[in-house]
Amino acid sequence: MTLEIIRPGDRAYGSVRHVYSATGSPAAVALPRSSVEVARALEFARAQPGPLAIRSGGHGISSISTNDGGTVIDLRRMDAVHHLGGSRLRVGPGARWGAVARAAYGWGLALTSGDSGDVGVGGLATTGGIGLLGRAQGLTIDRLRAAEMVTADGRVLRLSADEHPDLFWAVRGAGANVGIVTSFEFEAGTTPVVARAYVMFDLADPVGFLERWGATVEAAPREVSAFLYVGGGPRPFAQATIVYAGDGTDAATRALQPFVALPGVTGQRAELVPYPEVPLASGAPHTGQQAAVMHGGLATHLDRELAGRLGNLLRSPGVDMLQIRSAGGAINDTAPDATAYAHRHQNFSVTAVAGSAGAAFDAAWGPVREVLDGLYLSFESTHRPDDVHRAFPPATLERLRRIKGEWDPDDVFSQNFDVGVPTA
Ligand SMILES: Cc1cc2nc3c(=O)[nH]c(=O)nc-3n(C[C@H](O)[C@H](O)[C@H](O)COP(=O)(O)OP(=O)(O)OC[C@H]3O[C@@H](n4cnc5c(N)ncnc54)[C@H](O)[C@@H]3O)c2cc1C
């Protein structure tokens, strides 16, 4: 079959040019259907002038999965989800996490991803995956048992603990630096029904609340994962999504109770739901509709110092929302050197969201950034050179650069927090 390539003027161009957070006008969008076609698309792209973009679900928040005048390799046609037996799944990079959750549920399985069912598999599962089953299951990359990847020179390789183990290490946290993943094999979990609570809070004392929220999350059993979304302005408020992924409604009630005992509860709802109801999805086509930008980082505790700085952030102009996702639990069972995602002692991901980029947002974020400990690449919109040092501690970065130097010496995959190749 010939590789499908869409260009400006083609009828389908309008449906493939943009992503969720940006508009684009690429010169060509290749839509491969197999790893062999991905290799062909890459060869084509390397011969074109202009930038390259790799796209799976098009939900990357740094908007680099489209471009102006370059080539996009769009993996949307590679979206199959297969059951390989037991709790193993094979998933295409172009699948969305909502579809993965629905398919897995049919086989009695659930796999952690994130809070959005619209997010694509490829971007999230090459970076981390901090999800609402995270403290129970680990990061999404921790559930990866094998992958298929197209390298810069067009080879199609199978990666696992025994096959190209260096690339398998790199793909779990820095995948975008080393190749294009064309299929993922995951070990899913076996809790397809979870207890989910929504709790709304009025924050009379945001700093005190954040400290107590942090302590409550850390004290919770690892079956609990909890995400908090805080709106700023003159009267800060918050909404929490809390998931208990374990057996027994009594145990779920006990685990969720400390969250509804926090101050300022204005509403709450808890129910047993099939896991596919947890990652929320709109299925909306991409028109660059979400222009929001984010700054992010990781924290071990929401202590008074950090909570105080977050309180100031919430009062700053240009900041729309703060998101605090639980990490910890099973995520921290994995050794820091076992994957290219090395942050295995932190308990929280902290993200600030603004409607648009600007000096005011950066200035408000500065004091928070100073006290954070590490960076999760998926929640940072800007690409500052020092971000790779925050994302990858020295030993991780050195190993990554060595691997990249071997597999991508021309730095073809430079778009997404480029770690660079060794110079000598
Ligand atoms: C609404 C929303 C909610 C989110 N919630 C969470 C959350 O709860 N937890 C969480 O962990 N993350 C979350 N994220 C972040 C999300 O994980 C990243 O934005 C992710 O990159 C999106 O994946 P994608 O495939 O849709 O992105 P794309 O835009 O398609 O890809 C982003 C980048 O990833 C790289 N990439 C994509 N596919 C591949 C591939 N197959 N091989 C190699 N590199 C590839 C490319 O560099 C690409 O530019 C959220 C994002 C949004 C927009």
Image (tube, grey):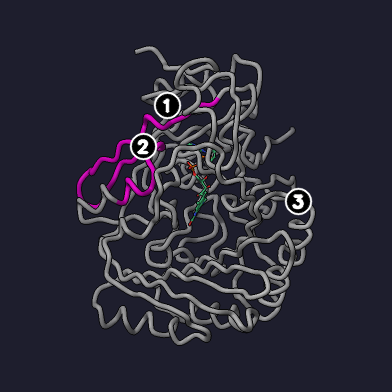
The quadrant of the picture occupied by the C terminus is top right
Give coordinates of residue 104: x percent, y percent: 26, 50
Pointer 3 residue:
358
Within 10 Å of disc 2 (Cα), the crowding (few <14, some 14-19, many 20+) is: many
Magenta span of residues: 72-101
Task: Determine whether 153 is above or below 200 in the image.
Answer: above
Give coordinates of residue 52: x percent, y percent: 60, 26
Which of 276 and 369 lies nearest the eye of the viewer? Answer: 276
Which of 74 and 204 lies nearest the eye of the viewer? Answer: 204
Please state which amino acid type lies under the numbered disc 3: Gly
- Please say whether residue 100 is one of the residues in the magenta stretch: yes
Dot 1 or dot 3: first in sequence order is 1
Dot 2 falls on a residue whose secondary structure is loop
Within 10 Å of disc 3 (Cα), the crowding (few <14, some 14-19, many 20+) is: few
Please state which amino acid type lies under the numbered disc 2: Gly
Is ligand 1 within 8 Å of the beta carbon of the residue shown at mark 1? no
Pointer 1 residue:
156
Pointer 2 residue:
92
Of badges 1 and 3, the one in the foreground is 3
Please state which amino acid type lies under the numbered disc 1: Val
Of badges 2 and 1, the one in the foreground is 2
Dot 2 or dot 1: first in sequence order is 2
Q: Residue at x 66, y 64 (%)?
A: 373
Dot 3 falls on a residue whose secondary structure is loop
Query: What is the distance, in whole Å, between disc 1 and disc 3 at their CAs?
Result: 41 Å
- The answer to whether residue 191 is seen in the rendering is no
Q: Residue furthest front?
A: 234
Horizontal relation, residue 70 to residue 338: left or right = right
Q: Residue at x 48, y 82 (%)?
A: 265
- Please say whether residue 304 is one of the residues in the magenta stretch: no
Query: What is the distance, in whole Å, between disc 3 and disc 2 at their CAs?
Result: 36 Å
